[in-house]
Image (spheres, helix red, strand yellow):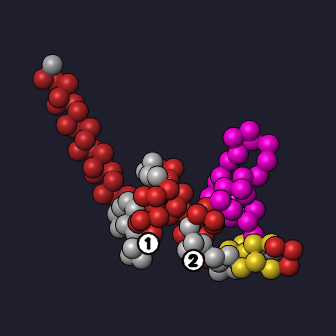
Amino acid sequence: MTKSSNAYKTIGEVVKILNLKSRNNQSSPTHTIRYWEKEFKQIKPKILNGNRRYYDKKNIELLKKIQFLLKEQGMTMNGVKKILSKNEPLKLDETLNNSINANIIKNRITNISNILKSLKKLK
C-alpha cells in the first residue's frame, strides 16, 4: 500500500525524497532537515506524538528549493534566507519549473555541438 502524493510524509521519507546522504553513510541524515527547519522559519512540519515530524507537500517543495539553492547553486544560508523572505515564486532553473521540454534541450545541445566542431576546425 502506497501513500498518496498529498499525504504527510515522515522525516525519513523526506530524506529519501531529497536523496540526502550522510557523510559516513552510516546514519540517516535527518539532522540536515532538522537543521534547515531551525534556520528557515518557513518550514513548519506538523509535530505530533513523541515529537514526530510530518511534512506536507508545501514543506517538501520548500525543502527541495532550499536543497537546490544550497547544494546545486552553491548559495550561502543567508543568501537562501533572503530569497525565501521575498515570498515570490522561485524560478530556479528552466528544467525544474517545467518551462522547457526535451526537444528544446536536444536542439540546444546540437547547436552547441556544431559550434564546437566549427571551432575545432579553426585550429
In the rendered view, does 55 fall on the left or right side of 92?
right
From this view, report whether residue 123 is shown above or below residue 50: above
Residue at 73% x, 66% y: name it: 11
Task: Decide if residue 61 is on the left or right side of residue 86.
Answer: right
Q: Height in image: 38 above or below 29?
A: below
Q: Is residue 20 magenta?
A: yes
Residue 121 higher or lower than 24, as above or below: above
SS for callout 2: helix
Point out the image quarter for the C terminus: top left
Disc 1 crowd rating (10 Å Cα; few below 14, some 14-19, many 20+) is few
Q: Is residue 58 left or right of residue 92?
A: right
Q: Position of residue 73 (x, y in %)?
A: 43, 51
- Pick whichever, 111 or 78, lies toward us: 78
Foreground residue, 68 or 16?
68
Q: Is residue 98 left or right of residue 43?
A: left
Q: Which mark is residue 58?
A: 2
Identity, as a three-letter code, of the amino acid under mark 1: Ser
Q: Who comes first in sequence, dot 2 or dot 1? A: 2
- Element on which disc 1 rests: helix
Magenta span of residues: 10-35
Residue extending farthest right: 50
Residue at the farthest top position = 123
Q: Residue at x 70, y 45 (%)?
A: 22
Image quadrant occupied by the N terminus: bottom right
Could you tell me which residue is drawn at 73 percent across and 57 percent down?
30
Q: Position of residue 14 (x, y in %)?
A: 68, 64
Is-magenta flag for residue 80? no
Residue 75 appears at what percent x and percent y?
44, 52
* Up-down relation of residue 26 to residue 16 (above or below): above
Q: Can residue 97 be seen in the rendering of this structure? A: no
Which residue is label 1 attached to?
85
